[in-house]
């Protein structure tokens, strides 16, 4: 069990805050390694792009489909059914004087008709306003990536400040932790909770690996 202590200490150093004295001993490599369980900015950007469905491949596909839409005909149809019934009775005084018999006529009719029409807007092969609408998604893509990147590094700088310059008073320490949670929440909102899920998954994997290493060391 004594051999397992260094691994447990390393794990706790990764997950727990440090004291001001310990902060002065950090190296750049060791400091950045403390955040190894968090996803990189590239992965967070990709998660945001997927969440907003503005991946460049998706935009190119929509743009191509908008251009080819002019080749798809507009189909219209019409169906009609007409039923008629005509009855004529004629009994005129003049006809009676001439000896013409009365006329009694009845005519029934039933007609069915249908029409199918296909039309193309081939002028849209040259210019289609919907292509411009799709192109506007590039602006959304750029805005999402910029916003996620800004929030990610504001959060990371705040995390590093808490290690290298840890607050001495409780109020400031709590305020900074809440700010980090707020930024994490913003990243979750823009990535479908990818940030929190990734951190939780990585921490769980680290704990399982450490526990497995401890058990192996203890049995040796």
Image: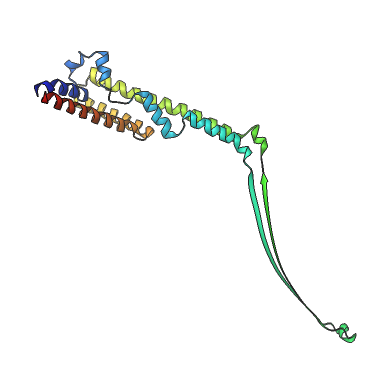
Q: Is residue 137 left or right of residue 181?
A: right
**Place of residue 38 in the rendered image (x, y in percent of width and height, measured from the top left):** 30, 26
Residue 183 image-quadrant placement: top left
The percent coordinates of residue 66 (x first, y second) are: 58, 35
Extreme-right residue of the structure: 98
How many numbered marks appear?
Answer: 0
Q: Is 146 or 203 nearer to us in this picture?
A: 203
Decide which of 187, 61 is in the foreground and name it: 61
Q: For residue 25, which quarter of the picture?
A: top left
Residue 136 x/y as whole percent: 53, 31
| Quadrant position of residue 69 | top right
- Residue 79 is situated, as x and y percent measured from the top left of the image, at 66, 57
- Asked whether, in this view, residue 214 is left or right of residue 44, the answer is left
Give me the residue at 25% from left, 17% from top: 31
Q: Quarter of the image for the N terminus: give it.
A: top left
Residue at image position (64%, 32%) is 127
x 67%, y 37%: residue: 122
| The C terminus lies in quadrant | top left
């Amino acid at each position: 069990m004594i051999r397992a202590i260094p691994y447990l200490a390393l794990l706790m150093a990764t997950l727990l805050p440090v004291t001001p004295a310990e902060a002065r001993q950090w190296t750049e490599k060791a400091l950045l390694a403390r955040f190894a369980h968090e996803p990189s900015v590239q992965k967070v950007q990709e998660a945001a792009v997927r969440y907003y469905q503005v991946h460049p491949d998706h935009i190119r596909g929509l743009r191509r489909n908008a251009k080819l839409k002019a080749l798809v005909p507009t189909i219209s149809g019409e169906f009609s059914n007409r039923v008629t019934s005509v009855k004529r009775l004629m009994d005129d005084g003049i006809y009676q004087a001439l000896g013409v018999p009365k006329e009694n006529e009845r005519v029934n009719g039933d007609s069915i008709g249908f029409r199918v029409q296909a039309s193309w807007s081939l002028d849209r092969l040259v210019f289609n306003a919907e292509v411009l609408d799709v192109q506007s998604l590039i602006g959304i893509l750029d805005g999402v990536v910029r916003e996620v990147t800004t929030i990610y590094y504001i959060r990371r700088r705040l995390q590093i400040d808490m290690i290298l310059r840890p607050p001495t008073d409780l109020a400031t320490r709590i305020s900074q932790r809440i700010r980090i949670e707020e930024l994490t929440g913003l990243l979750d909102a823009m990535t479908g909770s990818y940030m929190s899920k990734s951190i939780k998954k990585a921490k769980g994997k680290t704990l399982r690996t450490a526990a497995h290493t401890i058990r192996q060391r203890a049995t040796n």
